[in-house]
Amino acid sequence: MPRPGAKAAKKSGAQAARTTRDRILDAAMKLVARHGIAGATTKRIADEAGVAEGSLYKHFADKADLLIALVLERLSGIREVFGRLDQAAGRPAAEGLAVALEGMIEFYSQAQPIMAGISSDPDLLRLCRQRFIETDQGPHRAHEKLAEFIRQHGALRPAADPDAVASLLIGACTEFASLARLTGKTPGGMSKASYAKAIVAALAPILSSGGSHAAKRRV
C-alpha cells in the first residue's frame, strides 16, 4: 500500500520534470487557441504557466520569439503524421494517404490560429520567414514531405504530378480545418476519418492500383 503523500510527491516530480520553458509554450499554445494571438498577452501566458511575467524574457527575447518557437516546436505534429505513414507498411497507397490526411487535418486545426496571427502582423511575418529560412522549417515542409511520399511509394499513375496532388490533398485538409473553426460544421457533416477517406476515394482515377508502402522508388 503506498505511503501517504507518495502520489502527491510523484505528481510534483512529474511537474518539476517539465521545464519552465515547456510550461510557457504549453500555456501560449492553449491561450492562442482560446483568445487568438492578440488576446494571448504575455501576462495571460505567464499566469497560465504559473510564472512571473518577467520569467518569459529569460527564455524568449519577446512575444514574437515565443510565437515563432510555438510554430517550430509545438506545431511539429506534421512529423508525427509521416511517422504514422512509415508505420503503415504494406497497406495500399490509398489507405496510407487517408491516414496522413486525418493527421494533417488535426495539424492544420492547431496551426491556423497561430499562422493567421503571424500573417496579419508584417513585422512578425518577416521574422517568422527569416527563422523558417534559417532552420529550413515551416509549412512548406508538409507539402514537400507529402509529395515525396507520393513519389517514392508509387501512389500515382505515371501521368499524375505528385506536387500537384500534394497541393490538392493539403488544400482539402485546410478546408476542413477552416470550415470547422469558422462555422463549427465540417464538409458534409463528416468526421475527420470519413472525410480523409472520401478525399482519397475522389482521387481513385489517378491512384495507382498497385501502389503501397512497400517502397517503389523511382530510379
Image (spheres, grey):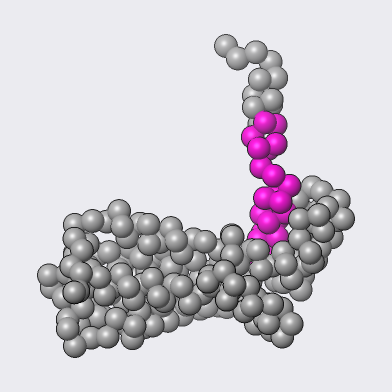
Q: Which of 124 and 37 is in front in this view?
A: 124
Percent of width and height locating residue 68 = 66, 68
Q: Which of 66 and 193 is in front in this view?
A: 66
Q: Does the magenta stretch include residue 134?
A: no
Residue 101 position (above or below residue 16): below
Asked whether residue 156 appears in the rendered view, the answer is yes
* 158 horizontally vs 81: left or right: left
Residue 152 position (above or below residue 2): below
Asked whether residue 191 appears in the rendered view, the answer is no
Residue 195 quadrant: bottom left
**Prevailing SS of the magenta stretch:** helix
Q: Residue at x 52, y 78 (%)?
A: 178
Q: Does the magenta stretch include residue 26?
A: yes
What range of the chain is rendered magenta? 12-35
Percent of width and height locating residue 212 = 19, 65
Residue 89 position (above or below residue 122): above
